[in-house]
Image (cartoon, grey):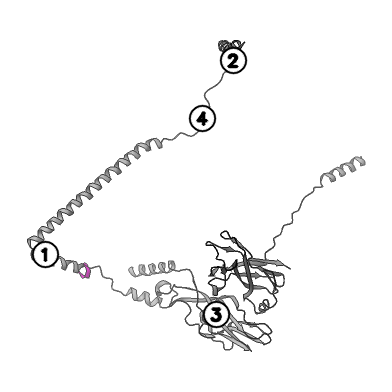
Amino acid sequence: MKKVLVASVLLASSVSVIAGDVPISGSVQTRCLITTDTNGVFGNPLPSKLSTASADGGVVPVVRYDVTLADAYIAKVTTPTAFSASPSLSDSVTWTGTTAVSKTSDAAMSGYEAAKVTYGSTTQFDLTKAGSTWFSSTATAVYGVNKSFPGGNYTAIVLAECIAK
Amino acid sequence: MSRLAVVALLATYAINAHSEYLYGITGNLAGAGHTWGMNNIGPNGSQGLRVNGVYYQYTPVKNTEDDMLVHVRNKKLGVAGEYIFSNTDDWSGLPGGIPITKGFAVDNLPIELWGDGSIDVEGTGSVTDANVIYSYKYNNDCLTPMSDPSCPGYTEAVLAMMVVDAKGYDPLADGNVTDIIDEKVELEDAPKQEDEEVEEKEKLQKLLSGVNDSILFANVTAQNLLMSSMSLSMKLNSYYDKKIAGGEYEDKVVMDGGELPDNKKGARSGLAQQLLHTEMVSLQYDKQE
């Protein structure tokens, strides 16, 4: 009688074991937001030159980085090295570009400009403070050797990246 | 009784006329210098104006090694030495030349508390291209005193309205009416026109009567078309209005059970056709042999 009882208890115990998957979910809020503040426009001061400089009749593109976490991100801004859209070009285009801090939301960010690192067409800023920083980029394209750009629309892209440290 | 009605009407109007807040921003108050007043913020006559944001931008001019503090602030009216808004940027040991821009949300503080604003530099250096803007909200509920019982001058305005002698409308006292009557009298008393003028008038009247006839004819035609389309609509509606009674519609066709015998006559006919067809096909091969 005892053996039967033990067996039935074991059976009941084995039936009551239920497996279950418990999901773990979470969301990560972005702490670095990139916003286009001003779209750039190419001026055409010479037949062979396109430039975003205001002196050349262009508009300098401005991008804003909003960082809510200090010393956690690096801003990388890359000026264009090719047109993303243009008429057919038969000669080479020489590109030059610079990126600089144009405005900050904190006095302590004024050191970003002196501490920036430039390689190739990319400029890197260490975002050590929380707040907003505006970066402006100039881009200049020269076609061949004093060769006129063919008529049409030209578009180039400034790449702005926020990279976690 | 009528006074009560007027008061009730005004009270109702006052409740309904309560509007939402309106929002606005100032221009650059620091444009003319580094101090500014807060007296002319908002539209004229705006009531309950409250400041809800302060935004400023300037460019520091300094050497990196110099110490410099920049205070952007507004005095608090009625409390000496206190500020209702104050923010300090510490540029000590930092390079100048790069503009700084900041924005602050302010907790809807009444304009009555806001004293003069200023940008003060402490240390070595200066500030250029200063730009200070305030955002605010207000309402226009009291542009007319009777808009709301809480508006200043409400009671006086209501009392002034109630003592107005509300006489009935006298058309003979209306300037517009008397002017028209006078013109009519003048026309009736005017001397008769010359024959030529009368003839021209008659011609013009004939022309106008012709136009009137055309308009009348067009109206009649339009009316006819309208009536025609309406009658068509009525004819069609009798069909559209038909409705099928609801409920369940069961099948009425019932197939009897049992065996269905093959159609022998049909089978014979089909077989005969097949035989004939085979014979015809075979004929072509027989010829070749």
Q: Choose between A139 and B116: the one closer to the eye.
A: A139
Pointer 1: what residue?
Answer: B188
Identify the image quadrant of residue B244.
Answer: top left
Q: Chain of mark 4?
A: B
Label 4 or label 2, whichever comes before in sequence order: 4
- Callout 1, which amino acid? Glu
Q: Looking at the rendered structure, which numbered label has been put on residue B260? A: 2
CB contact under 8 Å: marks 1 and 2: no
Mark 4, secondary structure of its residue: loop
Q: Position of residue B203 (x, y in %)?
A: 13, 55
Identify the image quadrant of residue B275.
Answer: top right
Q: Which residues are magenta?
A: B171-176
Q: Quick one: quadrant of the N terminus of chain B?
A: bottom left
| Cα distance between the residues tagged 4 and 3 | 82 Å
- Can marks 4 and 3 be said to lie on one chain? yes
Give me the residue at 57% from left, 73% from top.
Answer: A53
Label 1: few (<14), some or many (≥20) within 10 Å?
few
Label 4 or label 3, whichever comes before in sequence order: 3
Label 4 or label 1, whichever comes before in sequence order: 1
Label 1 or label 2, whichever comes before in sequence order: 1
| Cα distance between the residues tagged 3 and 1 | 73 Å
Pointer 4: what residue?
Answer: B249
Residue A41 visible in the picture: no
| Cα distance between the residues tagged 3 and 2 | 101 Å
Pointer 3: what residue?
Answer: B131
Mark whose residue sits in front, 4 or 2:
2
Q: Position of residue B105 (x, y in %)?
A: 58, 74
